[in-house]
Amino acid sequence: MKIYTRTGDTGETGLWGGSRIAKDSIRIHAYGTVDECNAVLGLARTCGLGDLDSKLGRIQHLLFVVGSDLATPGSAQTAIPRIGEAEVRTVEEWIDELEASLPPLKQFIVPGGCQGAAFLHLARTVCRRAERWTVMLSREEPACKQAIVFLNRLSDFLFVAARTANRLAGVADVPWESQRPQKK
């Protein structure tokens, strides 16, 4: 099988179920941004993140589920797996588990720290963008509501995972230095 098909040369792409849409449609932005988040997670995993790696690997597989869901219009007669409440609960449990080992936040932190944490912060911002595109898609046509919930929770997880990566590397989170005038 060749990797190129030439079917997208006119600016359209195929969806699950066989329909074709413009490559700049909201649906394509939504699942393309999910794919981008997945790629950033792959990059983060090259940093040797210890115990986080298995969770991140599982999330990568779940992002494929979200992407295939978003690539399937509501009218398609295709049975695909969907993200559900169980996956959201799993991510919530992971957040609680990681937060228990972190000092409480007292102010905003600047994205960064060790390389793995920086990549996880980048994945978090891409995940937020995927969530925004998915919300926009859901306003235009049917889209899986659990995908929105999952992406929202995933961005929270990625924030806590970035803080955990810094803790594991012995690197402190960098507090944001507000430029607001101090009250007297």
Image (cartoon, rainbow, N blue to C red):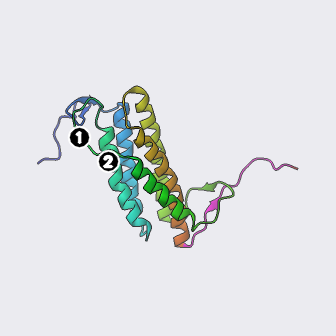
Give the answer, above or below, for where 77 lies relative to 120: above
Image quadrant where residue 16 sits = top left
Pointer 1 local density, CA inside 10 Å: few below 14, some 14–19, many at least 20: few
Image coordinates of residue 67 in percent, x first then y, are 33, 44
Helix, strand or loop at label 1? It is: loop
**Which residues are the magenta region?**
170-183
Q: Chief secondary structure of the magenta span?
A: loop
Image coordinates of residue 74 in percent, x first then y, are 30, 31
* Residue lying farthest to the top in this orientation: 140
Answer left or right for 100 relative to 30: right
The front one of 178 and 60 is 60
Give the answer, above or below, for where 25 lies relative to 92: above
Q: Looking at the image, can residue 177 be seen?
A: yes
Q: Is residue 174 magenta?
A: yes
The count of marks equals 2
Identified at 19% across, 33% down, the residue is 18
Q: Earlier in the sequence, mark 2 or mark 1?
A: 2
The front one of 3 and 79 is 79
Answer left or right for 42 relative to 181: left
Residue at mark 1 = 79
Pointer 2 local density, CA inside 10 Å: few below 14, some 14–19, many at least 20: some
> Which numbered disc covers residue 65?
2
Image quadrant where residue 108 sits = bottom right
Helix, strand or loop at label 2? It is: helix
